[in-house]
Amino acid sequence: MDNLLAIEAELVQRLQQRLAPLRPAVHVLTAADLADVTEEKQLCPAVHVIYQGYTPTESRADGRAVRIEQTWLAVVAVRNARAVQSGAAARAEAGALAQQVLLALQGWQPADATKPLQLASAPNAGYSAGYQYVPLAFTAELICRTTPN
């Protein structure tokens, strides 16, 4: 493995492929795509792939290999102006898209991971004036090795 964040590109590609048949078209974006974008200017519907960090889970005594668990968020973002006060329409739309994201990623194994993705605890969902956000968290296991000097 030559890139600690290589799974990002794999996640984006997987979601683009699996969500391509949906209408309206779903944008699959990364954190870089969201930099300096205000809420009213964001592309919707969308899934934002965001790296959340890692946890070492096992390490060799000599320090030359470590198993890590990365956490990735797939944040569903939709905008639906119907029933803005209650947010019911936006929640329904976000829930349906979140289900498609879950089906696309749960149990799928990226090439750079050592085992299939696992669903993990995610941050709370959010709602703001017609915009609904539903984060799904997945963990990926990787092994990082160093070579002797």
Image (spheres, rainbow, N blue to C red):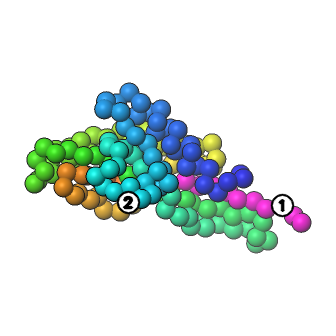
Q: Which residues are magenta?
A: 140-149
Q: Main secondary structure of the magenta part?
A: strand
Q: CA distance from mark 1 to mark 2?
A: 35 Å
Percent of width and height locating residue 78: 28, 46
Task: Answer yes or no: is residue 119 visible.
Answer: no
Q: Nearer the viewer, residue 54 or 6?
A: 6
Residue with the mark numbered 1: 147
Percent of width and height locating residue 109: 56, 43
Q: The residue under label 2 is which amino acid type? A: Ala
Residue with the mark numbered 2: 122
Question: What residue is drawn where x is 50% and y is 43%?
Answer: 12
Looking at the image, tell me whether mark 1 or mark 2 is earlier in sequence order. 2
Horizontal side of 59 relative to 8 (left or right) equals right
Q: Judge whether residue 127 is colored magenta.
A: no
Query: Dot 2: within a 10 Å radius of its alpha carbon, few (fewer than 14), some, or many (20 or more) residues?
Result: some
Secondary structure under tag 2 reads loop
Horizontal side of 83 relative to 57 (left or right) equals left
Q: Residue furthest top?
A: 21
Quarter of the image where the C terminus is located: bottom right
The reply to whether dot 1 and dot 2 touch (C-beta < 8 Å) is no
Q: Judge whether residue 141 is colored magenta.
A: yes
Secondary structure under tag 1 reads loop
Question: What residue is drawn where x is 43% and y is 54%?
Answer: 34
Question: What residue is drawn where x is 70% and y is 59%?
Answer: 144
